[in-house]
Amino acid sequence: MANTLNVSVTDLGLLDFETTEYCELQNAAIIHRLVRGNSDDASVSEFDLGKTDGNWLASRNYRSWLIPEAYRLLQEHPAKKHFITITHPKWQKNIGDLDTLGLSGIEQWHARRFTKLSRPVLAIGGIEVSLGVDCSGSRVWEGHSHLVVAGPRVAELSQAFLIERHYRKQPYLRPVVVTPVGNLARQIAYSVKRIGARRIAYIGANGRQQRRSLPLQLSEQVEFDRWLLSLPVGNRTVLFGCRRHGRRLCPM
């Protein structure tokens, strides 16, 4: 499995990876939503999904080689792998302002912390956005990252990615979560997915705040679509310790 030149995502066990037919249906749904949400009654022909992260076909093509390549590099790395999820309060955006989310700033935030680690780091993942709905019904876009990391230990990762003190005073639910990697291919695929959702807060039976996921509402989905359509395909990917060369990932 080390050589992935001819390995597909289904070879890695990702049998539910989207088909081209599914992507075509999703692209048609995007165009339909954009037409419905356009006050100028623009025609369908005016919408060009292009090579953007919003185009399901372009995104599928990109992830179909990225996932096997990431798997190859991470599988070859001798150190234990960990899955890290980071949700930072300063990556929040109000409804209507999702297009102001600075992806380069988020990538630099990760790079500064990886650089502080004494051990060599290989990290591959992505930045995504969900819509947080708190118990009062208030909504906000929440940026977060998912990465598979090889090299550092759990304690080193947790310390390096400790949320700044002046943000930790806010009532935030587990902003940094580090867990062992179980299914490597599936956790890589999860890290670079392109689906938005509502994450609705509620108080569970244990008296603690929990969240459940539901689909975005129409106006929210349109904003999410427009955001992805403004991004070149692959723009949400986070790489550290490797670089992209064509359709290959090369260690640094």
Image (tube, rainbow, N blue to C red):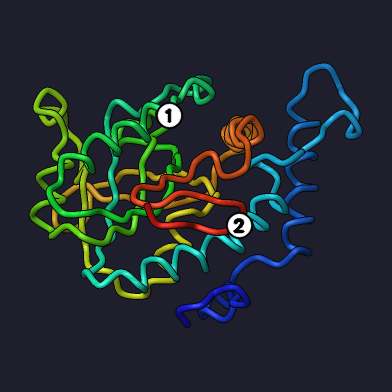
Q: Residue at x 35, y 73 (%)?
A: 76
Q: Circle 1 sits in a helix, a strand or a loop, which is it?
A: helix
Q: Is residue 87 above or below residue 207?
A: above
48 vs 252, nearest the viewer: 252
Dot 2 amino acid type? Arg
Specify whether 87 is left or right of 65: left
Horizontal and vertical percent position of residue 31 = 79, 39
Q: Residue at x 57, y 81 (%)?
A: 11
82 vs 116, nearest the viewer: 116
Furthest-front residue in view? 252
- In whole angstroms, how far apart are the C-alphas of marks 2 and 1? 22 Å
The part of the image, by quadrant, that contains residue 82 is bottom left
Q: Residue under circle 2?
A: 247
Q: Residue at x 36, y 32 (%)?
A: 106
Q: Is residue 75 above or below residue 225?
A: below
Specify whether 123 is left or right of 186: left
Q: Nearer the viewer, mark 2 or mark 1?
A: 2
